[in-house]
Image (tube, rainbow, N blue to C red):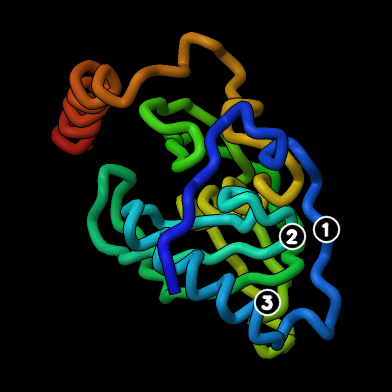
Amino acid sequence: MSVRKIIRMGHPTLRRVARELLPEEIGSDEMHRLVADMIDTLHDAGGIGLAAPQVNESIRLAVIEIPGGQTRYGEIPAMPLTVFINPEIEITNPEGAGYWEGCLSVPGLRGFVTRPQHIRVRALNLHAEKMELDLQGFLATVFQHEFDHLDGRLYIDHIENPTNLVFEEEYERYILPEESAAEDAQRRNS
């Protein structure tokens, strides 16, 4: 197991549609090594999700681990470390909500992205077993963000207003306090 280099925006692999994994590849030693490396890389980078294209492997594979608890996005349910192979997303309700997203492949920036908030995910695990999850809210956003990497898309492709792409330092200095104050005012008025 080792920490791999996370490629950044501008690298051509991030803009390619990744290929599906074949059944015989899923349980292979090579795939287990790649997943272990991706987990080490995810933990080293302090992220909550990592797609194989981000470590320059153009295959339909992602790992997601969300600690859960109270965050700037509200209370978020935990998602144990899970491997997703050849995932598919079905939008079960197109109602959207926006979050300030960041990405390990787009370091130093945040962008406000609106995405559907009710989805169903179908994928295989490392044992080639089928799994299905119904996700809402922030979790739906996380999964769409990670699986976008498998289709050669980055969160910046979804930003509707270019003024909603900011450096992380400015986000923390100006936008986050403003949003926190607005939330406090809303709670007081409720």
How far apart, in angstroms, are the residues tagged by discs 3 and 1? 21 Å
- Between discs 1 and 2, the one toward the N terminus: 1
> Number of numbered discs present?
3
- Closer to the camera in the image, 122 or 34: 34
Q: Secondary structure at mark 2?
A: loop
- Between discs 2 and 3, the one toward the N terminus: 2
**What residue sits 22% from the left and 20% below the top?**
178
Q: Is residue 101 left or right of residue 152?
A: left
Q: Is residue 45 left or right of residue 126?
A: left
The residue carrying pointer 1 sits among few (fewer than 14), some (14 to 19) or many (20 or more) residues within 10 Å by Cα, namely: some
Residue 14 drawn above or below residue 32:
above
**What residue sits 54% from the left and 41% below the top?**
7
Q: Which mark is residue 132?
A: 3
In percent of width and height, residue 143 lies at 58, 55
Q: Which mark is residue 57?
A: none
- Closer to the camera in the image, 99 or 156: 156
**Residue where numbered disc 2 is placed:** 59
Give the quadrant of residue 179: top left
Q: Amino acid at mark 2?
A: Ile
Can the viewer see residue 174 in this picture? yes
Residue 45 drawn above or below residue 101:
below
In percent of width and height, residue 74 lies at 30, 49
**What residue sits 62% from the left and 58% below the top?**
52
Q: Amino acid at mark 1?
A: Arg
Q: Are marks 1 and 2 in contact (CB under 8 Å)?
A: yes
**What residue sits 55% from the left and 73% below the top?**
35
Residue placed furthest toward the top: 163
The residue carrying pointer 3 sits among few (fewer than 14), some (14 to 19) or many (20 or more) residues within 10 Å by Cα, namely: few
Q: In the rendered view of the protein, which quadrant contains the N terminus? A: bottom left
The residue carrying pointer 2 sits among few (fewer than 14), some (14 to 19) or many (20 or more) residues within 10 Å by Cα, namely: many
How far apart, in angstroms, are the residues tagged by discs 2 and 3? 20 Å
**Residue where numbered disc 1 is placed:** 19
